[in-house]
Image (cartoon, helix red, strand yellow):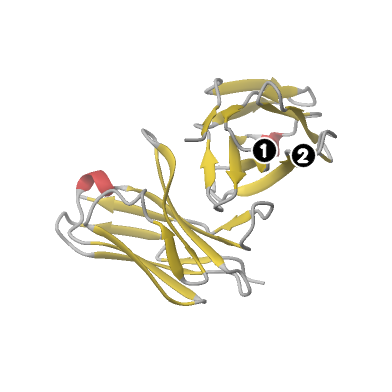
Amino acid sequence: AQTVTQSQPEMSVQEAETVTLSCTYDTSESDYYLFWYKQPPSRQMILVIRQEAYKQQNATENRFSVNFQKAAKSFSLKISDSQLGDAAMYFCAYKAAGNKLTFGGGTRVLVKP
Amino acid sequence: DAGVIQSPRHEVTEMGQEVTLRCKPISGHNSLFWYRQTMMRGLELLIYFNNNVPIDDSGMPEDRFSAKMPNASFSTLKIQPSEPRDSAVYFCASGLRGVGYEQYFGPGTRLTVT
């Protein structure tokens, strides 16, 4: 069974600084997608970024970027120029054939002004 | 588009009562998912449907839980009888069938069973 692990329960970052969230996963599949979702206090789940496993190029969305290391099964999220609105829970998720999303346990990001 | 709609947003009920959570997926989406979120267990997939047909209900905790999708625009998750340990936030999500498509989440229903 696929598993997703986020080893950092909480990360703190100074406003305008950079923070990196870790995620590792376990799979025997070759075709899959990885996602980072953000859950602010409103509890709405919002997609931040996605990565296709067959693409070597790391995905980027504005201040958010990933470091995808397929061989190591690692998928970290970097938030650059952190803003107060980035404070939230961040979930790493994996999806392969079968349509199921498997989530990690989440990392809480605190942004200090 | 209004996004995924869930009702009610909050539900407080007494142990033993029946609870029904409702979801309206985004029009055109052919997959629907029910998740439960708790502090202890995180986000768990309970069940999902493709084209209104239940595909995987292995996450449903026990027979007290049931889910239906009578048509493409409506789904329910029912708990009967409810127990305090069912207290959680229940999310409905919808998306297009296929590995590369994201899931769009509703705002969730916070259920409290006393």
- The answer to whether marks 2 and 1 mark residues whose Cβ atoms lie closer than 8 Å is yes
For disc 1, the marked residue is A30
Q: Depth check: B16 or A56 in front?
A: A56
Percent position (x, y) of residue B98? 64, 57
Quadrant of the image occupied by residue B7: bottom left
Left of A22 or right of it: where is B86? left
Left of A61 or right of it: where is B101? left
The image's mark for residue A15 is none
Q: Decide: is B88 above or below A112.
A: below
For disc 2, the marked residue is A54
At 39% from the left and 35% from the top, the residue drawn is: B39
Q: Chain of mark 1?
A: A
SS class, disc 1: loop
At 20% from the left and 56% from the top, the residue drawn is: B82
Q: Is residue A54 visible?
A: yes
Q: In the image, what residue type sits under mark 1? A: Ser
At 36% from the left and 48% from the top, the residue drawn is: B59
Quadrant of the image occupied by residue B85: top left
Q: Depth check: A7 or A43 in front?
A: A7
